Amino acid sequence: MPIDPRQQHLLRSLPGVDLLLLAADDEPALQSTPKSVVTRAIRESLEALRQRILAQDASLAEPALSPGALMATVIRRATQIQSYNLKRVINATGVVVHTNLGRSCLAQEAIDHVSAMAARYSNLEFNLETGRRGSRYSAVEELLCELSGAEAAMAVNNNAGAVLLCLDTLARGKEVIISRGELVEIGGSFRIPDVMARSGALLKEVGATNRTHLRDYQQAVTTATGLLLKVHTSNYAIVGFTTAVSLTDMVALGRQLNLPVMEDLGSGNFIDLTQYGLAAEPTVQASVAAGVDVVTFSGDKLLGGPQSGLIVGRREILDRIKANPLTRALRIDKLTLAALEATLRLYRDEAQAVKRIPTLRMLLCRRPEIEGRAQQLAETLRGLNHPRLSVTLLNLTSRAGGGALPLLDLPSCCVGIALDGQSPNRIEAALRNGRPPIIGRIENDLYIIDPRTLQDDELEIVVAAFADMVQRIPG
Ligand SMILES: *Cc1c(COP(=O)(O)O)cnc(C)c1O
């Protein structure tokens, strides 16, 4: 496209990089910014302006190209470049275990233990009693055994890794029998069949999607069979005309045929959630008590700890898993281990766990408490007294997320916010680009804040973001 005289004039008035570099030398706000960052900020700011000029951006006026305005743009860009890529966000979605937002927030005890272990040396793999090399797993093995009732335990990088490791150890080159109804795909392209293929185990699906009987497993067993696998259908439920083989029956079959039985629980947990009025989610203890030989689950789903994959089960099997060279590739790091140990310790006292672990606290938060927070938020927003801002309280539902409790709607009280002249998408984008970013959701064409997943000190951040937003919009 030909360049018109106005564009030409604007392009010519852009200073060169060298000139701006000289000006930056005298700019107080850039004194402690590394040279490389200043140079990059200048280049990118000029390039962005050039693009806007070429695109005939009507909102771009000559004052934006004044030396003062240019320097302000460069400073803003430099600040952006210098800020962390991984940053704190505010989860106002109401999805408690939100994988895209980091799943679980750690309990204060876990945060403290991580920071103590990060700053100093530790007995990570050193036995203080014998003065010799120790096991990395000893920090959590006893706790995991105590909580689950299992003989032995270990922790790896994540549950996908735990599943891979168990299959590789127990069924490499052998057949693994699994029900068709349990071929789970979770987000991030984790599919049970694909993981099995990687482990070198051969998948043998039995039954139909909605019904699998014990005889299906019995008929599928051959001399090539190495393992019976049960996968908790964590992110969906098959409802209606269904039959699944009970864990007890599978264990009995495994014993009779001398085959190990493994269960991937997905989002494992130690607390019977039905006591708190939630749907039943299988506990790790129940699987161990049913006699399953090895159970795997995530550390950062309902458990509320750091990303990790936990394996509990029979000692003989855990010994084989620990000796597998893959274990080294999937090993848990010391900071995660510190967070995990501190989190697991809280489970020794269920009342403590429910109070101290944010994931559990949010999940079990009762509606009246959420309603109180929603009212507080709504009143403060109304107090901004902006004629175009309208705020309503809505009875909506939150979700557990993380592939747990898929059918469970958690009753919540949300705040719906509309701003006359702004689409909900505009509101969403503005808050998402704020500092810190606030992530809400849009439902029925309304911007929604669900207070369930807000921590105590975050209400005022949400209010401040709205105050800032409406202040820039004329009444
Ligand atoms: C979430 C999940 C996994 C993977 O766990 P990560 O900790 O995310 O690796 C595996 N199996 C099931 C059934 C799950 O729900």
Image: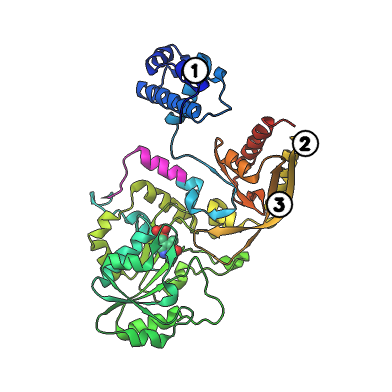
Q: Is mark 3 within 8 Å of ligand 1?
A: no
Whether 347 is drawn above or below 197: the answer is above
What span is in magenta?
111-125
In the rendered view, how is the structure colored?
A: rainbow
- Percent coordinates x, y for residue 140 in the rendering: 37, 56
Q: Does the CB distance between marks 2 and 3 fall below 8 Å?
A: no
Disc 2 crowd rating (10 Å Cα; few below 14, some 14-19, many 20+) is: few
Which residue is at the front of the view, 56 or 218?
56
Q: Is residue 124 magenta?
A: yes
User: Farthest residue toward the front?
Assistant: 2
Q: Main secondary structure of the magenta part?
A: helix
Give me the C-alpha separation between circle 1 and circle 3: 58 Å
Q: CA distance from mark 2 to mark 1?
A: 42 Å
Instruction: Find numbered disc 1 in the image and state the secondary structure of the residue it sits on.
Output: helix
Spatial CA distance of label 2 from label 3 is 24 Å
Q: Where does the image place residue 425, in percent across and percent down from the top left?
A: 61, 45
SS for dot 3: helix
Q: Are marks 2 and 1 in contact (CB under 8 Å)?
A: no
From the image, tell me which residue sits under label 1: 9
**At x 60% / y 50%, what residue is drawn?**
441
The label nearer to you, 2 versus 3, is: 2
Q: Is residue 90 left or right of residue 171?
A: right
User: Which amino acid, by three-letter code, is at mark 1?
Assistant: His
Q: What residue does disc 3 label?
A: 371
